[in-house]
Image: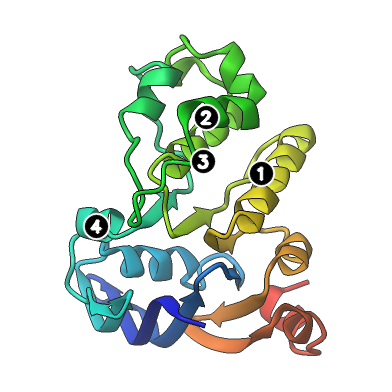
């Protein structure tokens, strides 16, 4: 399968702190990859490095075969990668509608199947709050808005960093339902979430990080069945 994004020998630093140590990662079209590891093992840093947010980085990153190792975050986004960050990142002084419409654009192939109306149907809670400001929404509603905004860019790959963190169980179930719909629609997905069982039940493959190194990877079933998994996740 054709890789959307692939990276080899990734290193990343924050000042003198060396966080990533030669990580390789690849995500194919339509594939769901689960990224696992305890807190502080480098998961968010790996994501931020792939997206161009970490200035001190080394290694090669290719997006649709094009070298983007030194690309800026907006350049990566324009090439079809959407990011739902930990903390949601909605615009608090814009309404729900404005948050969504300002992000809308066609996909790489001209697709516009994730319309404003489809997002409203997918997230009925947002439809009820369409004129509310982003800052007036609950945490779960903000997460829905962040995902909806990402979908309206018609990405080839969507990256979800702790999309269910701190949310009520009913909202968590709703987020996982939508993640399933995204994957079923052919959008490649990179998922980071503390519920590793749920991640592995939805992923095609998984990669486990420990202290900035890839220590376990394979199909989701292979990783789930590995005797080493519990030690790496601290469970």
To which residue does mark 2 refer? Answer: 142
Name the residue at 65% across, 22% down: 124
What residue is disc 4 on? 73
- Say whether marks 3 and 1 touch (CB < 8 Å): yes
Helix, strand or loop at mark 1:
helix
Instruction: Give the mark, 3 or 1, whose residue is nearer the N terminus.
Output: 3
C-alpha gap between disc 3 and disc 2: 9 Å
**From where the camera sits, is residue 66 visible?**
yes
Percent x, y for residue 42? 46, 71
Residue 178, numbered circle: 1
Camera-side residue of 85 and 181: 181
Mark 2 to mark 1: distance in Å? 14 Å
Q: Quadrant of the C terminus?
A: bottom right
Say which quarter of the image contains residue 37. bottom right
Disc 4 to disc 1, how far (Cα)? 25 Å
Marks 4,2: beta carbons within 8 A: no
Vertical placement of 100 versus 154: above or below?
above
Asked if residue 60 lies left or right of residue 111, the reply is: left
Which residue sits at x=22%, y=73%? Answer: 68
| Mark identifier at residue 147 | 3
Q: Disc 2 or disc 1, which is closer to the eye?
A: 1
Q: Earlier in the sequence, mark 4 or mark 2?
A: 4
Badge nearest the viewer, 3 or 2: 3
Where does residue 123 sit, x and y in percent of width and height? 62, 28
Mark-to-mark CA distance, 4 and 3 = 18 Å
Say which quarter of the image contains residue 192.
bottom right
Position of 190 relative to 22 (above/below): above
Mark 4: few/some/many CA within 10 Å (<14, 14-19, 20+): some
């Amino acid at each position: 399968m054709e890789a959307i994004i692939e990276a080899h020998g990734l290193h990343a630093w924050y000042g003198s702190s060396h966080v990533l140590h030669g990580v390789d990662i690849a995500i194919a079209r339509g594939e769901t990859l689960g990224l696992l590891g305890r807190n502080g093992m480098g998961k968010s840093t790996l994501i931020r490095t792939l997206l161009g947010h970490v200035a001190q980085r080394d290694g090669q990153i290719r997006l649709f075969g094009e070298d983007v190792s030194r690309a800026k975050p907006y350049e990566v986004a324009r090439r079809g990668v959407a990011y739902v960050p930990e903390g949601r990142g909605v615009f608090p002084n814009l309404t729900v509608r404005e948050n969504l419409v300002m992000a809308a654009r066609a996909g790489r192939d001209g697709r516009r199947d994730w319309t404003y109306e489809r997002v409203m149907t997918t997230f009925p809670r947002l439809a009820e709050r369409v004129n509310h400001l982003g800052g007036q929404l609950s945490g779960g509603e903000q997460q829905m808005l962040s995902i909806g905004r990402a979908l309206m860019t018609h990405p080839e790959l969507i990256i979800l960093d702790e999309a269910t963190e701190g949310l009520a169980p009913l909202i968590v179930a709703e987020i996982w339902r939508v993640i399933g719909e995204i994957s079923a629609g052919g959008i490649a997905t990179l998922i980071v979430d503390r519920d590793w069982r749920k991640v592995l039940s939805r992923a095609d493959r998984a990669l486990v990080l420990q202290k900035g190194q890839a220590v376990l990877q394979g199909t989701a079933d292979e990783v789930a069945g590995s005797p080493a998994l519990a030690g790496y996740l601290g469970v």
